[in-house]
Image (spheres, coloured by chain):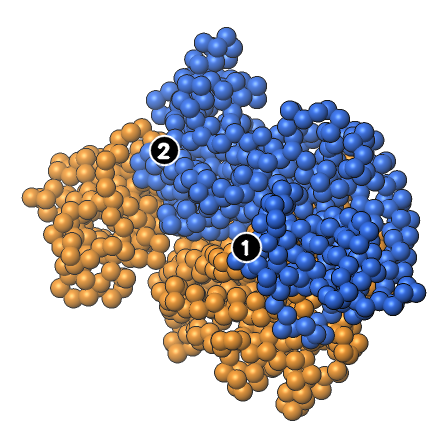
Chain colours: A blue, B orange
Amino acid sequence: MVKSEDPSIVVGDAAASKKAAKKAAKTAEKQQKKAEHKASSAQPSTESEPDFSEGLYGNMKMIQSSGEHRDRVYTDVENLSIKMDGQTVWVRARLQTSRAKGKQCFAVLRQTSSTVQLLVSVNEQRKISKQMVKFTGNITRESIVDVEASVVRTAAPVESCTIKDVELVAHQIWTVSSARSQLPLQIEDAARPEKSDEPEALKIRVNQDTRLDNRVLDLRTPANQAVFRIEAGVCRLFRDILTKKGFVEIHTPKIISAASEGGANVFTVSYFKSSAYLAQSPQLYKQMAIAADFDKVFTVGAVFRAEDSNTHRHLTEFVGLDLEMSFKQHYHEVLDTIGGTFTEMFRGLRDQFASEIATVGQQYRVEPFKFLDPPLKLEFPQAVQMLKEAGVSVGDEDDLSTPDEKLLGRLVRAKYDTDFYILDKYPLAVRPFYTMPDPGNPKYSNSYDMFMRGEEILSGAQRIHDPDLLAERARLHGVDTSKIAAYIESFRLGCPPHAGGGIGLERVVMLYLGLDNIRKTSMFPRDPKRVTP
Amino acid sequence: MVKSEDPSIVVGDAAASKKAAKKAAKTAEKQQKKAEHKASSAQPSTESEPDFSEGLYGNMKMIQSSGEHRDRVYTDVENLSIKMDGQTVWVRARLQTSRAKGKQCFAVLRQTSSTVQLLVSVNEQRKISKQMVKFTGNITRESIVDVEASVVRTAAPVESCTIKDVELVAHQIWTVSSARSQLPLQIEDAARPEKSDEPEALKIRVNQDTRLDNRVLDLRTPANQAVFRIEAGVCRLFRDILTKKGFVEIHTPKIISAASEGGANVFTVSYFKSSAYLAQSPQLYKQMAIAADFDKVFTVGAVFRAEDSNTHRHLTEFVGLDLEMSFKQHYHEVLDTIGGTFTEMFRGLRDQFASEIATVGQQYRVEPFKFLDPPLKLEFPQAVQMLKEAGVSVGDEDDLSTPDEKLLGRLVRAKYDTDFYILDKYPLAVRPFYTMPDPGNPKYSNSYDMFMRGEEILSGAQRIHDPDLLAERARLHGVDTSKIAAYIESFRLGCPPHAGGGIGLERVVMLYLGLDNIRKTSMFPRDPKRVTP
């Protein structure tokens, strides 16, 4: 509905967005029909003039695996280079934009995050007709095309494309899959850098609801292509690092018979003639895996929170990276393992995803993520002291508020030059019932949070492996022990001391990249107001 | 409740199991109290005789990370060897069995799947008292102990342990975590080989419900320790192989607004003031990721089926290994990628998990899994022909029944010597609405299943990427297109031809190992009758 060519229109009003989206869809449908008519009228041989390009362009028959063209070799856009100057290639890519002017049409082809310029120019000898140029100019944006072309060195670098030193000069062009003519958002608007040094009038933005309503288009921006490749990298690094340390991957059930961490914030599922719940975490199951001799385990999977929190960092469904590990004498054996895992992960991201991080940086201002090796470890009373010195009063046995955590993140960064740190020894009162009390000071506990850019991304602790103390603590927290009988029973079967933690994947990616909203790092986010698409 | 020493008792009656389990739990509780009394009476210095072992044995204080013994170095049982003869080591392990006879106590220590013999023998010079021997004899099975001991070469191999050439001679023994005295099942019963050449009277078995009700204990058997390590291996191999091929891992929502594959068999979730569903597959989302330019994607996660199927191979929640991939001209580009992925995975399992596979083989009869490289590919009509020749009549447009599939698996194995094969070109009528019809024969489709030991483990196809044909096929299948509007809309935004498939993790592991029930390969299985533990 919004053309980027018109800088006066700003797509950014959240309230109007849904209505606008509907209206746009209707308009788009009408215009689609028009465009289809137009496109079909641009088919070969409908013009009165003889068309010497016949058979070299048009709408390709739907690819149904008939066996045609199976030997055709395609070149990826990112691999086009000056070395191929003069070669003929086939490319399948999206037509990002096209502009026909008289006897020429300039287009940009895009494949994932790579772009190259395409020239279709009337040339009787090379069998490029006026009709073929017109056809190309009429191909709708975001359509997928097959192009046969010569790779040609450019006189001056093409600054608007990622491939700058060569362009493609078309011999054939066929649409493989046509996009509707009016798109609910333009990729170039969705990809526009969020930088404040541009003139206000040029700030065409796409608001978040419009993006999420049309996620398939929104995900095509270079930044989003990079964000979700980095997210895949976080998962891979997490698993590879832990596998190398001897951890075993497990899978824990999402459908459970009793709320795992208290009755609040849990979704109910109808389960045949009865009902069940969606797991808020794999907590009880990963501990049971420890009691079952798996020694060190991790699990990556969906966790569910029926919390009516509409913030920048809460989702109702997210991906949990959880781990649990038995230890010999001290939970710091586990704490240090987790801390080291983060350090290795940050190093892996920095070294293996430099190009993706740079791509995200072209749209969003990303300060490089700073970390120490080994990571910084503070104790809760030290944090309270730092906050006090900064003029904030926090009770010794209170949890930290979100603003306090953010302030602390800034104080820590100023003092220690790190965006990642571990805060150990939380007050017992603010932690779950299964948290092991500190042996030296009953007000504190053997528990820790870990922070990235001042926001919590991991919560963990030594767990109580003694069934009697566990039952006692559960009762103190008002937990109905009859509902977690199988869990408590696990510790009557012999269980080693153990500790662990749970990480929110989307938060890690958001904070690593310095993004401002968790919906930017969830491919199809779920919150209290959104379950589509 | 069942002692393995009494061979006349067979624990195998499914109907009686729940009741028995409850009764056993009560009995166990009583006996636990007795045992605790007994254990505490075995504490040092309660005997009248002077105890020269005082301070060398007993119940250790709960490990609460006080900082004690932090420099103690522990040796893993699997690393004990003749090279360490004469050395003193600390070992933390489970006491699997103990047998005190006069002045000696023989025990077996177990760590994961490794076992070693422990000897505690009265010896005044080495400060091993009668009381200490008695204490060791009274430690409940499955308790976790810390043992300081000398590694001593054995005169004859200890056939009952995995470590045969050395044993441990105790200096100190401490219980770290005590198991209740009466266990609901014995590990040695649960681990007993299922081989028919044993006398019937020795066949003490633990039935499946008893195992699953007490899963933490059941998982400690060597076979189960191996099964779930192999399962982790399948996941790792699947991801690593695809990542190397350029696939991107994605995460798809489990909470969805409309049933993804028709309205039946879907669980309903109450979602704030409304309701939603649990995804039956990531199908629509992985296809949307393709439309969003991710080109090749995979996802590993929970999928849910509200099917009231109580069979050996159905679960209501299982782990889906899904992949989707765009292709240029023919869906066999994808089919061959998937086939090659399986071949690589089978090779990886065979080469990297030989010891685990052998361990499973000690309890269950496992015929080595046979596969070809490249995998065997048959077309549906060929399968129908093979079945016809074997005397089974199958209609050309019918799906194969489960018994037919199994028979076909046997015929294929006899003819081609492979436990894995691909069956291509299923009748269109038996496939989901989004399946691409065969361009040459409208009765067939560009779809395939893959089989292991005659059971289906993957279903896949070329998908319809043309929005009009997709909507038409959906209507023909009676699917309400208004409910999948966002999905159909994805294909109006330009989408390359693509194909993919979905694999059931638990089935792959079950069939690779030749096990007879899918509950053996799900750590905490969910079926219509089970949501605990």
Let me know if residue B170 appears in the view: yes
Chain letter of disc 1? Answer: A
**To which chain does the residue with label 2 belong?**
A
- Dot 2 surroundings within 10 Å: few (below 14), some, or many (20 or more)? few
Quarter assignment of residue A157 = top right
Q: Amino acid at mark 2?
A: Asp
Regarding residue B307, the answer to whether it shows in the image is: no
Q: Of all residues shown, which one is farthest toward the left?
A: B125
- Which residue is depicted at the point 62% across and 42% down? A159
> How many other residues sit within 10 Å of disc 1, few (<14), some (14-19) or many (≥20)?
some
Which of the pair B299/B150 is nearer the observer? Answer: B299
Mark 1 — residue?
A: A82
What residue is at 69 percent from the left and 75 percent from the top? A67
Which quadrant is home to the C terminus of chain A? top right
Residue extending farthest to the front is A125
Q: Residue B484: x, y in percent?
A: 79, 52
Looking at the picture, how far across and down is residue A174, in whole percent? Answer: 75, 63
Where residue A373 is drawn, which disc sits there?
2
Left or right of residue B449: residue B234:
left
